[in-house]
Image (cartoon, helix red, strand yellow):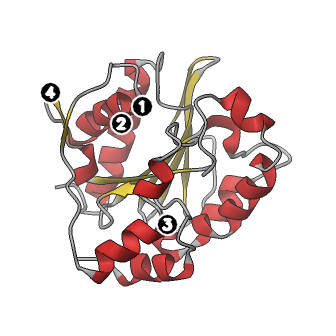
Amino acid sequence: MYSSSFKKLINESSDNTYIGRGNTNANILFVGKEYSKANENSEFDGKYWKEKIAKNESVYLTHKKAVGEGHTWSKYQNLHDCIFEKPKTNMFDFEELIFTTEMSEIPQKNTRNAKRNPEFEPKLAKRKQEFFKSDFIQNFPVIVLACSDYIKNNDEIREIDEIFGVHYKDEYEKKIYTKSNWFFSHYSDDKTKLVIHTRQLSTNVMSELLANMGEVIRKHLILLNLHP
């Protein structure tokens, strides 16, 4: 039920390390900025997953929709539906085929307040070098970094390249719709890993952005014979 790489990550993580939620054997990872609820860390932290593994217990992955269309979960569901070409329903079932985590594990409702925390930068830097370099994270063939400037790839800083072993080239799929709606694709040299960097998926994200990213991801999974 649980892969050796996931068990290794959990064994090496502290009890209060935020791990994430969803299908641990999925081929797709969504990475947000941070969780907003102060108690969400304890729901899906290292201790939570250690107990699940010890009992070889599965996690319920389908939930009835109880939030609005601007909520991140709604955008994750919409992107899932674009990837797998599924009709819209009144259920959240994206976790059946996707695992989700957060770039920062300090809970906050907005970016401005998150960055004001004196622990934000050092904890973020440590998480990038430890949690995100684990075999479990590195083994995902598709990673969507929906966390805007919480991670950078620019002329001076190449965090995405360094952490995930991928590269950006001008010919790879990219779209800039507006200043706040964009995505860039990065691939490993052997083209087995796709990493997409984009904005936080919430509120005013364009449906066209989700549709185009979904198409890029779907084509990559088909190429790897991983599309169900």
Q: Pointer 1 and pointer 4: residues touching (CB < 8 Å)?
A: no
Q: Nearer the viewer, residue 174 or 75?
A: 75
Q: Nearer the viewer, mark 4 or mark 3?
A: 4
| Amino acid type shown at disc 3 | Ile
**CA gap, disc 3 to disc 2?**
18 Å
Q: Which residue is mark 3?
A: 137
Q: Which residue is mark 2?
A: 76
Of callouts 1 and 4, the N-terminal one: 1
**CA gap, disc 1 to disc 4?**
15 Å
- The image quarter containing residue 221 is bottom left
Q: Nearer the viewer, mark 2 or mark 1?
A: 1
- Horizontal arrangement in the rendering, residue 77 relative to residue 47 (left or right): left
Q: Which residue is mark 1?
A: 72
Label 1: state its secondary structure.
Answer: helix
Q: Pointer 2 and pointer 1: residues touching (CB < 8 Å)?
A: yes
**CA gap, disc 4 to disc 3?**
30 Å
